[in-house]
Image (spheres, helix red, strand yellow):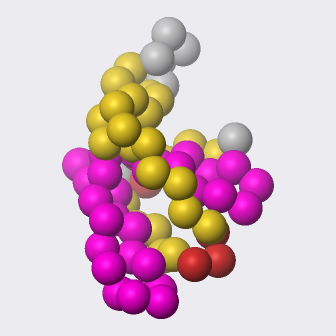
Amino acid sequence: MAVKVVIKETGETVTGKFATFEAEKVGLFSGIMADKKGGFRGCGRKRVFDVAAVTVTADDPDKEFKQR
């Protein structure tokens, strides 16, 4: 399970376990854990990126992405 964020300007790849999408931002978390409702949420270190500046891919999008 991995989420990859590629920064379009530099081509740098940043890897995490869970990503959230909020308005114009992408939050990439270093960890993933179960929440009380039977879903998943991010934990650990959080890095924030602009949506327009990155490309986000995941091995299992249903489990690793969350729209807020």
Residue 63 visible in the current orientation: no
List the single residue furthest toward the top: 36
- Residue beneath the point at 46% across and 29% down: 41
Magenta span contains residue 4: yes
On screen, residue 49 versus residue 63, left or right, reads: right
Q: Residue furthest left?
A: 1
Up/down of 42 relative to 26, above or below: above
26 drawn magenta = yes
Most foreground residue, 14 or 18: 14
Rendering coords of residue 62 (x, y %): 46, 46
| Residue 47, horizontal then vertical, whole percent | 45, 51
Residue stretch rendered in magenta on the structure: 1-28
Residue 13 visible here: yes
Q: Which quarter of the rendered picture does the C terminus lie within?
A: top right
Residue 30, x across and y down, in percent: 31, 42
Left or right: residue 59 versus residue 35 is left
Left or right: residue 7 compared with residue 33? right
Q: Main secondary structure of the magenta part?
A: strand
Front position in the image: 52 or 58: 52
In depth, the one of 19 and 36 nearer the eye is: 19
Q: Quadrant of residue 4?
A: bottom left
Q: How many marks?
A: 0
Residue at point 32%, 79% (across, down): 12
Q: Is residue 34 above or below residue 51?
A: above
Residue displayed at 39% across by 76% down:
6
Q: How far from the left and from the top, in percent, is residue 67?
A: 64, 46
